[in-house]
Structures are given as structure tokens and as C-alpha cells.
Image (cartoon, helix red, strand yellow):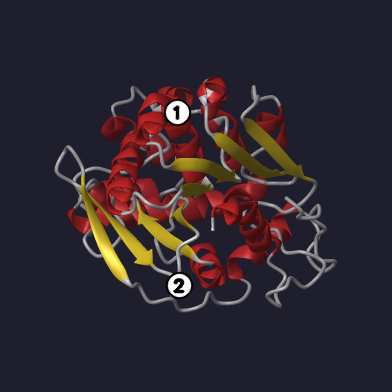
Amino acid sequence: MNTKEFKAHPLLPGGQLQTLAGYFLSPPPAVAADEFIYVALPDGDKIELVINNPKGPVTATLYLLHGLGGDSDSGYKLRLTKKLLPLGYRIIRHNHRGNGVHGNEAKGMYHSGSAVDVLECLKEIARRYPENPLGIIGFSLSGTIVLNLLAWYAKELEDLGLLKAAMSVCAPIDLEESSRALSQLRNKHYDLFFAKTAIEQFHRRRFISDDQAKTYLHRPSLRKIDEHVTAPYGGFRDASHYYDECSPKHTLSQISIDTLILAAADDPIVPAQSVLKAPIQHPVKLRMETSGGHMGFLGRHLTTHGDYRWLDTFVENWAQSKFKAVQ
């Protein structure tokens, strides 16, 4: 890869400004779907995948998975779709359970351990597009899911054969440490956003009652939601058990696919130390930037696309380095 190290825009120094500006700055482009795929899961739920096909030959298929509170229309997914389609990439935009047109019908929920859902989707992608190499990119919480997928289902992925490379962007590696980071006063705005988003969805989908929603909205926190909703529905004893079982720090050494972890030293949600102390070894590589915040990475210089989205250029260069040779 030839992406230079990240240098923050002079008006956006530090992780907080990078994170907030990355989320709020500039509306994402409109990208209409070419088609939808619905993947049936063993428990009766289904996952909606949004497909965008290039006009010419397909370089590779890139499968993008969103973070907590996101969906197939998350801004970073739409930007990348717009930028990567002209390079010949088929883009698949994932909707976790609870998202998409039929999201409210889902009986289950997604969390950091929802790797088997993604595995089922990969099987369907491989069935439909067996002629194209495949790359997977997970953002934030989905970066955690992707790392768990690569470790927990290494044999199944090897048998599948198509998945050639993976990227995890700003993923919590130690969920307990990320939970503690969110609970800090300086990060309360993120905690409130994630908690309220989860409460709204769980209430809409009838996982929680009106009274429970009111209770959780009193001093809301993501840990409270994980303790009382995510953990029991996910089959965990409590939030601590959930965090421990689904933290990739335990299983990174089991990954056998070429994998890149992108992180920022000033990420307010994913403490740098929790990433640096993880047992990362070949074929997993770590790219730790000195700044960038959580999914921000608004750079000092304009990119070739005429914006300041260093992250998009990084993903583009990564994809080209892995798949361009197969054209």
C-alpha cells in the first residue's frame, strides 16, 4: 500500500473533533441499489444485502459491514460505493438484523459476536458470485464482528475459498476497555447516542416494553443496555460475560486470512492501548495512525476525489493493492 500516514486537518486536531466532524461533515452521496439479496438464517430471520454492480468487468467483490447504529446507507458505505464502483468493484452493503426494509420483522438482534450471520451471507455471496475474489471490510462494531468471524470460522472460510483479504476499521478489540472508555464523562455524548439508538430500535421491535424503554432512557448508557437486553438475548450471563466472550483479543492468533486492522491512537471509543497490547501476528497486520479519532480521518490535504476523506483513500488503496492484479 502507498497510503501516506494520516495527518489531521489543521482545523480538526484531536480525536474528538475528528470523530464528530467525520460523522457530521458533508452529506453522503445518494446511491441507488441495483438489487437486493435476502439471506435466510438458520433461526428463521433474514439479512438484507444491498448490491451495486460496476458497469464493466468486475475486479472483485467488496463486502461492507456497518457499525452500531448504522445500516446499508451509512455515509462511509455510500461514499466508498461511489468511489469504488468506477474501479470495477462490486459493492455489497450489509444490513445487520433489525436494519433494512424488513428489519422490524427480525426476531434476533446483532452484537459483537454475530459472526455466524455474516458467515451465512458469505456463503450466499460465494454461491452467487463464484468467479470473483472477495474482500470484507468491517467498520467499528462490525470490525469486531469481522475479526471474530475470521478467528471462529477459519476452517469454514478456508473451505469457502473466495475470501482473500479483510480489513477491520476502528474496531473494539477489548470490549470491556471500550465500555469503560464510553463511560468517561468526556465521551458521554457517544454513550448517549449509542444507547438511545439501541433503545429506540429495541422498543420499535418489541424487545423491550414501554416501561422498560422509559427506565433505560433514565440515565441511559450502552453498558446498561448490554447488561439488560443484549446479553440476555444473546445468551450471555451479563454484560461482562458478553464483553469477554466476544473480544477478539482472545482469538486473533487463530486468523489465517490476510487481515489489516486500522486504528487511531486518539480514538475516544477504542483505547489505543487495548489495540497495541493485543496479540497481533501474521497474517494480521496493524496500522495505528497517530490521529483520526473514531471513523474520522479527515486529512490535511485534498484527496484525488476532491475531499479530505483520508479513510476512503486508504480503503481504496488497500483494495487496489489486494485485488487490482486479478483484473
Look at mark 1 in the image and give the residue it sits on. 246
- Residue at (39% x, 68% y) in the render: 52
User: Is residue 172 left or right of 303 when viewed as pictured?
Assistant: left
- Residue 58 x/y as whole percent: 45, 63
User: Is residue 132 left or right of 117 when viewed as pictured?
Assistant: right
- Residue at (60% x, 70% y) in the render: 24
Question: As displayed, is residue 153 above or below residue 35?
Answer: above
- Residue 181 x/y as whole percent: 62, 38
Q: Earlier in the sequence, mark 1 or mark 2?
A: 2
Residue 265 is at least partly visible in this image:
no
- Amino acid type at image mark 1: Cys
Look at mark 2 in the image and give the residue it sits on. 56
Figure quadrant of residue 4:
bottom right
- Residue at (34% x, 38% y) in the render: 119
- Amino acid type at image mark 2: Gly
In this rendering, the label closer to the viewer, 1 or 2: 2
Q: Nearer the viewer, residue 160 or 295?
A: 160
In the structure shown, which secondary structural element does the residue marked by tag 1 occupy? loop
Question: Which image quarter is the C terminus in?
Answer: bottom right
Question: As displayed, is residue 141 above or below residue 81?
Answer: above
Task: Please tell me how crowded label 2 is: few (under 14), some (14-19), or many (20+) other residues with Cα within 10 Å.
Answer: few
